[in-house]
Amino acid sequence: MPEVTTPYEPGTPCWLDLMVPDQQAALDFYRDLFGWQGEVGAEEFGGYSVCTLKGKPVAGIMQTMASEGQPTPPPAWTSYFATADADATQQAITASGGTVMAPAMDVGTFGRMLIAADPQGAVFGVWQKKDFGGAEIVNEHGSLVWNQLSTPDPKAAGVFYDAALGLEAAPLPEMPEFTGFNVKGRPIGGMQGMENLPAGVPPHWLVNFAVDDVDSVVDALVRAGGSVMAPPFDMDKVGRMAVVLDPWGAAFAVVATNPPA
């Protein structure tokens, strides 16, 4: 079901957010592209915007920030994985060779979070629910449908995410040539090597948004100042998809699933 009414199982992608240098412009861009509603938030949370679809939260957008003495991070989408205990997950990440970039911290009464990178360098977030559980609409137009890890060492990545987040790497049931990540036997994301990606692309998690019509969304994105990395194409047993950049260079994919995920 597109509407999420129960807590996410630990290890499941539960939230995503964008760090971008022009927050208001990004709010306007994604409003026009996906139909999101959102505004710059309260100062106590750094102006963080919770964007909604049909009145329910689907993603966050925030102004780019850098720690003192650190370089400004590039615009990027971050995927967050649910956990029952952020501090225990942080310990598991470091024990498994990952790097904690922002240690576990409370976000008011909403939850507890951290940002980390796996041993190959792909960045991800972890979210422990308190008052806020995460996205309440998924798998429909304008919302999260899939997360795909691109890594130079899929085997090592599978070992890491199993130890750190409890994700089981295994062939996807309907596409055994592809590797998926499972939570209690249910696919929640995928993984691929990087041999077919352009040189210089770093390891990363790619956010995939469901859309009704890939071609029209890509056309709208280009008119609004975005660009295309992989033009719309049909993928067997999945549907039509494209990989794009928003006007600030943050990458994501749009997918018209067939049948719906």
Image (tube, rainbow, N blue to C red):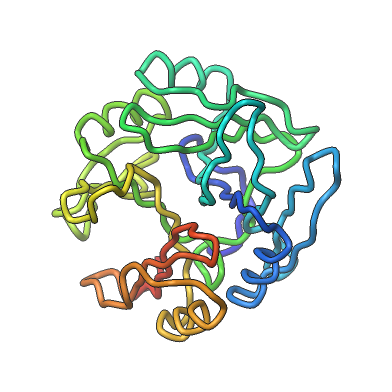
Position in image of residue 4 (x %, y %):
60, 56
Q: Nearer the viewer, residue 30 or 160?
A: 30
Position in image of residue 258 (x %, y %):
34, 75
Q: Quadrant of residue 24?
A: bottom right
Q: Residue shown at 33%/42% (left/top)? A: 203
Instruction: Tally the numbered discs.
Output: 0
Q: Residue shown at 43%/69% (left/top)? A: 254
Q: Quadrant of residue 55?
A: bottom right
Q: Residue shown at 27%/27% (left/top)? A: 159
Residue 122 vs residue 106: left or right? left
Q: Residue shown at 75%/37% (left/top)? A: 110
Q: Quadrant of residue 224?
A: bottom right
Residue 239 vs residue 215: left or right? left
Q: Is residue 81 above or below residue 76?
A: above
Q: Nearer the viewer, residue 124 or 112?
A: 124
Position in image of residue 85 (x %, y %):
58, 23
Q: Nearer the viewer, residue 61 or 134?
A: 61
Q: Is residue 227 above or below residue 88?
A: below
Q: Is residue 17 above or below residue 36?
A: above
Q: Is residue 169 above or below residue 191?
A: above
Position in image of residue 41 (x %, y %):
81, 51
Residue 157 vs residue 125: left or right? left
